[in-house]
């Protein structure tokens, strides 16, 4: 009695009519493709690459924005070396209003931010006034928000 498993191991089978296709075409290798991860991994890599490119583009725009802002701060008569602190105040404000965009925020958001700085107890009065000056320069000199021309922010929060 012959073992049927031994025949399978012995060697490749001749092509059958199902693998030859129509009119005796050359046999195509049967590939065990799993539809699961092969295509998804490639798509993930493409999306990640696009996100990285967008991220690099966005980062370049942000750095150009901050260079313009720091130039504006230097041109406004602020002591040299303080532009980094002005930028930090503005960055903290931007983080506080997310997901709202900078141009969409108004005087109310600026006032609330300054109140939180003062009431948080971690900032001295001069730091809150510096944050207000930084935001005033940002909105009047770079964002050009219409409401900022008269600067309706309540700057008297610090006595």
Image: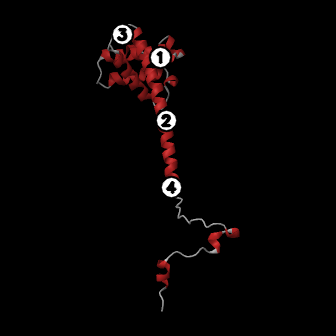
In the rendered image, residue 69, in percent from the top left (x then y), is placed at 43, 17
Q: CA distance from mark 2 to mark 1?
A: 29 Å
Seen as rendered, the residue at the extreme right is: 23
Which mark's residue is nearer the viewer, 4 or 1?
4
As measured in the structure, the alpha-carbon distance from the residue carrying label 3 to the one carrying label 4 is: 57 Å
Upstream in sequence: badge 2 or badge 1: 2
SS at badge 4: helix
Residue 76 appears in which quarter of the rendering? top left
Question: What colouring does the structure picture have?
Answer: secondary structure
Q: Secondary structure at mark 1?
A: helix
Pinpoint residue 66: horizontal percent, then vertical percent. 43, 21
Q: CA distance from mark 1 to mark 3?
A: 16 Å
Residue sitting at x 48%, y 30%: 58
Q: Nearer the viewer, residue 115 or 61?
A: 61
Q: Residue at x 40, y 22 (%)?
A: 90
Instruction: Name the mark on residue 34.
Output: none
The tag on residue 139 is 1
Q: Quadrant of the C terminus?
A: top left
Q: Name the residue carrying label 2.
A: 53
Q: Which residue is mark 3?
A: 78
Residue 132 x, y percent position in the rendering: 39, 16
Instruction: Tell me if residue 139 comes above or below residue 34 in the rendering.
Output: above
Q: Are marks 3 and 4 in contact (CB under 8 Å)?
A: no
Query: Disc 2 or disc 1, which is closer to the eye?
Result: 2
Q: Is residue 88 above or below residue 36?
A: above
Tag 3 or tag 1, which sits nearer the N-term? 3
Q: Is residue 157 above or below residue 18?
A: above
Disc 4 and disc 1: Cα gap in Å?
49 Å
Q: Are marks 1 and 3 in contact (CB under 8 Å)?
A: no
Mark 2 packing: few (<14 Cα in 10 Å), some, or many (20+)? few
**C-alpha gap between disc 2 and disc 4:** 23 Å
In the picture of the structure, the residue carrying the numbered disc 4 is 38
């Amino acid at each position: 009695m012959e073992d049927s498993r031994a025949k399978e191991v012995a060697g490749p089978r001749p092509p059958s009519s199902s693998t030859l296709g129509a009119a005796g075409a050359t046999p195509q290798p049967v590939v065990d493709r799993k539809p699961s991860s092969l295509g998804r991994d490639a798509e993930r890599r493409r999306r990640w690459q696009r996100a990285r490119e967008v991220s690099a583009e966005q980062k370049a725009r942000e750095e150009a924005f901050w260079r313009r802002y720091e130039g504006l701060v230097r041109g406004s008569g602020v002591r040299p070396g303080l532009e980094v602190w002005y930028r930090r105040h503005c960055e903290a404000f931007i983080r506080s209003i997310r997901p709202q965009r900078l141009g969409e925020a108004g005087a109310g958001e600026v006032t609330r931010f300054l109140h939180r700085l003062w009431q948080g107890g971690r900032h001295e009065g001069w730091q809150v006034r510096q944050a207000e000056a930084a935001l005033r320069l940002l909105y009047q000199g770079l964002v050009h928000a219409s409401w900022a021309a008269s600067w309706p922010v309540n700057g008297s929060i610090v006595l």
